[in-house]
Image (cartoon, grey):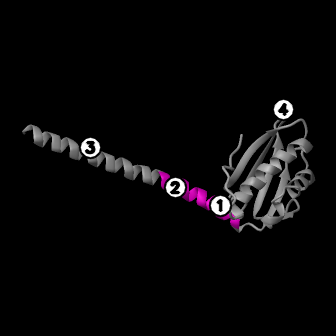
Amino acid sequence: MNRLTIQAVLSLSLCIQAARFAAAQQAADAPQSNAAAERVQAIKDAQTICIHSETMFLTVSTLERALMLQKNWDRLELNILGEGCSADLEINVDRLHFTHIHTYVLTDKRTGIVLAAGRVRAFDGVVASGPMAERIVKVLSAARLPGQTSNAGFAP
């Protein structure tokens, strides 16, 4: 084979590899965007939310009050139901033992998909409820309110 033929074969093989890589990259990106769209749709479809606490340091009523004090809460049009009810979304809060770290997980009860999760470091649940409610409302607002953009979701 002459030099031009070898260069043509190498160039063609590089093009094929680049096309395969691009196709693989698109396939890898598709499930992530699909999962994100599914999370957003679950938040948009929700009408009710339930709060469950695994700790006595952060009560359900404390987080309820903190959520209702957030400026966008009324615009979200979500109803908070009492514990044990079947709501569309559920917030589970807990406190890690022997620490001041309070955690929250927002899930879609129908599918079990985690929509948001995070933790707040605070001495007690009353102090932790403010930043926790702010982050939860930020996630809900990004999906439910037009014009709200946010990088909310999983927060440390």
The reply to whether residue 54 is in sight is no
Q: Earlier in the sequence, mark 2 or mark 1?
A: 2
Q: Is residue 32 magenta?
A: yes
Instruction: Identify the residue under disc 2.
Output: 31
Q: Earlier in the sequence, mark 2 or mark 4?
A: 2
Q: Nearer the viewer, mark 2 or mark 1?
A: 1
- Tell me if mark 2 has few (under 14), some (14-19) or many (20+) residues whose alpha carbon lies within 10 angstroms of its own: few
Give the residues in magenta.
29-44
- Tell me if mark 1 has few (under 14), some (14-19) or many (20+) residues whose alpha carbon lies within 10 angstroms of its own: some
Dot 3: what SS? helix
Q: Earlier in the sequence, mark 4 or mark 3?
A: 3
Dot 2: what SS? helix
Dot 4: what SS? loop
Q: CA distance from mark 2 to mark 4?
A: 37 Å
Q: Note whether 9 is above or below 97 in the view shown.
A: below
Residue at screen point 64% across, 59% down: 39
Q: Where does the image place residue 145, in percent across and percent down from the top left? A: 72, 64
Instruction: Identify the residue under disc 4.
Output: 99
Instruction: Identify the residue under disc 1.
Output: 40
Q: Nearer the viewer, mark 4 or mark 3?
A: 3
Q: Earlier in the sequence, mark 2 or mark 3?
A: 3
Q: Is residue 82 left or right of residue 28?
A: right
What amino acid type is highlighted by mark number 1? Val
Residue at screen point 75% across, 64% down: 88
